[in-house]
């Protein structure tokens, strides 16, 4: 039996229905705005029911979310042909394949921008919102769960709202959200955040109860974050980075509290952040997108005072620990809309240290975060550019090689640029750290080649750079062989240049 | 005889000296911060004297400015071997050649960032500042001339200051500057500009008179801006853009005042802006880097109410007209430091329409603003990314071909990415306008291919896209021929694929 005490606006109790009944409200051609950010606080029942419905009844929608969904939902929807357009982010392997086949239109956006694009009319209007909630307040307001993402703008703009009340989330979660809807972004409002812990909004999503057309009950945890296995490369990267921070402190540019930290999703970034717990730091803070296991470890260790994000994406163990002792965490974390966590204005003002993962870097410091061999998308740009462009320090971490050495993550020229060299200050691999600040392109190449490259690719990359310099240029390249490593890979399964057989 | 009434701090009169005497204060290895932004308000005597000195006495400096210098100064300095490091922008053809030969280190920076990089200690400390002034106030404060650029941060940070008083600039220029030095950018200050005309600083550059070690008198106009010849392509681009604005107004997304405009330097952008004078617009405003002839034409026509920039770079005729009737213009223009004109926070808050010139665009909407064949720099990124990343609408304009058709400006893949597809909303050539908002990469390619490409390159670019799609991917590419047009150019002097000789 659903716990109808979670519907404090009592007349809304009549809107309770099954997920398949709710899915009937979603029609072909609609624009749906669903909660969910990095697999947290997402729709667990209605979108799944929509995928089932689409199997037998043509229903093809535009699906907007905060970021990625869990539960295999994106894959099920894409397989059922239910998605015409998907934005602004996804990370489902099945949907990824369909995107790369051209089977649906994926608008891979900076995560800060979707709310503004909806408000400005650059994207189509939202027909229906699907929002996971802990409960519904007496005035119809929605108490979100483990993410805020774009939920507030979806509720504000949608004609109709479906609420999924998830009984797996304690009602005590109320109070960790700070929901702020800026005025028209083409208007004149200052975003008044000057401290990571500062509240500028309200702790619920306002919603006209007339808009709520359906309430569906669920009792299902978020898809757990993958936990990072012990990884020698990640440990080495963390060590190089800690050493760098120590030098910055010695130079007087940072204090032992560093600056508010943003860390991208991914095992390496998470491991690096955990590494901070080993260092001699105090009163750390975080102003990030996603609060991960590492955030909890830093809070538990007493090193971190406060963490602001748009979602909590935790492993099962950490999820249980946080909700079992929520009173301990509730004054140390805050979840905001993603156009606030990722706002250029706030990121610049707070002087964020941004730590993101690169898929590949080139010798001049350009970074590819999203595309394999320039063509096939992995996930998307996410919030990485929001932070890289506006941070005090923009750091990219990556292993120097992958696939047992068949792929070098440092290449002559990246096959897709998500972050130009202007937005990359530091590159770290397990081999070492290249500090690119105040360097010209040729100097950047020397730093990256001497610090970050795996020995197996050293000779080939050095040779490329030296021969390119002979031809000249501010950023010397040999266009006819800039992608030679990638075409080797396509031909032989390895970037290594085949050694000609001797006679 | 120098007009010493321009030195209101009378004891400073003893510091008057010749430019060659002033150049003696600059020693090998020093870091020099000089005024000057897009050839306006630059040092006309002391840097020229330094170039002469360096011909016979080894003097190799780091030279920071606002942006480009006029008078051939950069070329003379580079030729004399006087420059070890140059930042953040230059546009001198002689210096460009030396940069591309690797003869000096050029740090091509986003123009918004240099002041913060100096303050943060990411760049070396400034030893000596050289600032062009209209006059010196009784308290030592400096009244700048036709640009502000980075002058205020240079004066604040330098140990010594050389002032060049330019008698060609009327003292009545005082009042058009708004000099604001933000607190430590890693701190917590809100940049409180909410309207283009808003003043937040003071109208002079504060300077401890003890720091002023030299005053040099000059009487020399700024290097004039090149005037745009009648250009059919620029006219067609302007026509497409006006049509687009009309559609945006009809859709309710813009009003007849549009939004504050930023326009990059260059004949096309200037011509496009002039084209606005033909449209049915009113109460236009500008929040840009450079105020050009087109700005004055819009003000003269009554269409533009106010223009904020960091410099005035005018043709000789326009320069004379403005200074002859300065009372008319002084309440309609404002010059600010470049970290304020180009601040992400303000650009987002005001909802700027940014119009910049592309060197080349690719079929997916990535833009190269700076490098020929990926290697050779032309000028630099300037402020284009500051605006493209943060504007309400980011528009890039370019002719579809150049060099008599030997070069297509639309290519399969740009050889250098200054602006990723995420920061490009609209691309306009004389062929047409591609509105890329809300499109996936394949849809962007279809829009650009069908609207922007020159007929001479249509078949080849279509073929590339179609064959790439067959191979698959979210952003389909054929890496082995992505730069075929560029290698054709290197081989034959034309991007056109040579037609095989028939038998």
Image (tube, coloured by chain):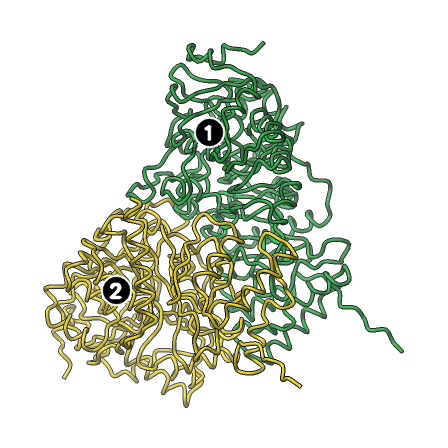
Chain colours: A yellow, B green
Q: Can residue B241 be seen in this view?
A: no
Q: In which quarter of the image is the N terminus of chain B?
A: top right
Whole-angstrom CA distance, mark 1 to mark 2, is 43 Å
Residue shown at 58% from the left, 24% from the top: B45
Q: Nearer the viewer, residue A271 or B110?
A: A271
Residue A503: x %, y % from top left:
67, 86
Residue A105: x %, y % from top left:
49, 74
Residue A85: x %, y % from top left:
46, 73
Residue carrying label 2: A275
Residue A41: x %, y % from top left:
26, 72
Q: Is A334 situated left or right of A485 in this image?
A: left
Q: Quadrant of the C terminus of chain B?
A: bottom right
Residue carrying label 1: B129
Residue shown at 56% from the left, 25% from the top: B46
Where disc 1 sits, the SS reads strand
Q: Is residue B55 above or below residue A228?
A: above
Q: Which mark is residue B401?
A: none
Disc 2: host chain: A
Location of residue B495 by image quarter: bottom right
Q: Is residue B17 above or below residue A13?
A: above
Disc 1: host chain: B
């Amino acid at each position: 039996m659903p716990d109808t005490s979670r519907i404090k606006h009592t007349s809304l109790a009549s809107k309770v229905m099954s997920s398949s009944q709710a899915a009937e409200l979603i029609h072909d051609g609609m624009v749906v705005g669903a909660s969910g950010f990095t697999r947290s606080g997402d729709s667990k029942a209605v979108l799944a029911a929509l995928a089932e419905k689409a199997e037998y009844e043509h229903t093809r929608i535009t699906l907007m979310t905060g970021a990625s969904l869990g539960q295999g939902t994106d894959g099920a929807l894409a397989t059922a042909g239910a998605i015409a357009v998907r934005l602004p982010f996804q990370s489902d392997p099945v949907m990824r394949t369909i995107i790369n086949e051209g089977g649906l239109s994926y608008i891979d956006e900076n995560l800060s921008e979707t709310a503004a694009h909806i408000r400005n009319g650059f994207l189509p209007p939202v027909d229906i919102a699907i929002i996971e909630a802990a409960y519904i307040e007496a005035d119809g307001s929605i108490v979100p769960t483990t993410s805020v993402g774009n939920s507030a703008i979806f509720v504000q703009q949608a004609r109709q709202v479906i609420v999924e009340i998830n009984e797996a989330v304690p009602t005590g979660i109320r109070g960790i959200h700070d929901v702020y809807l800026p005025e028209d972004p083409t208007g004149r409002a200052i975003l008044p955040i000057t401290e990571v812990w500062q509240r500028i909004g309200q702790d619920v999503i306002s919603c006209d109860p007339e808009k709520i057309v359906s309430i569906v009950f669920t009792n299902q945890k978020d898809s757990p974050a993958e936990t990072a296995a012990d990884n020698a490369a990640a440990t080495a990267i963390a060590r190089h980075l800690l050493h760098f921070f120590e030098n910055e402190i010695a130079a007087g540019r940072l204090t032992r509290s560093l600056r508010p930290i943003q860390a991208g999703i991914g095992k390496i970034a998470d491991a690096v952040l955990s590494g901070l717990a080993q260092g001699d730091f105090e009163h750390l803070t975080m102003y990030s997108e996603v609060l991960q296991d590492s955030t909890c470890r830093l809070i538990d260790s007493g090193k971190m005072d406060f963490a602001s994000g748009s979602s909590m994406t935790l492993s099962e163990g950490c999820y249980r620990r946080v909700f079992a002792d929520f009173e301990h965490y509730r004054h140390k974390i805050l979840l905001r809309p993603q156009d606030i966590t990722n706002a250029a204005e706030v990121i610049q003002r707070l002087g964020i240290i941004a730590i993101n993962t690169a898929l590949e870097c080139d010798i001049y410091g350009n970074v590819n975060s999203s595309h394999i061999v320039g063509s096939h998308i992995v996930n998307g740009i996410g919030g990485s550019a929001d932070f890289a462009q506006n941070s005090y320090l923009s750091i990219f971490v990556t292993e120097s090689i992958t696939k047992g050495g068949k792929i070098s993550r440092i290449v002559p020229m990246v096959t897709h640029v998500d972050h130009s060299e202007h937005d990359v200050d530091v590159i770290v691999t397990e081999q070492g750290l290249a500090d690119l600040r105040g360097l010209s392109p040729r100097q950047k190449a020397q730093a990256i080649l001497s610090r970050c490259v795996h020995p197996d690719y050293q000779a080939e990359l050095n040779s490329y750079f030296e021969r390119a310099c002979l031809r000249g240029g501010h950023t010397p390249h040999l266009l006819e062989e800039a992608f030679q490593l990638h075409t080797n890979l396509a031909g032989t399964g390895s970037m290594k240049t085949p050694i000609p057989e001797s006679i």
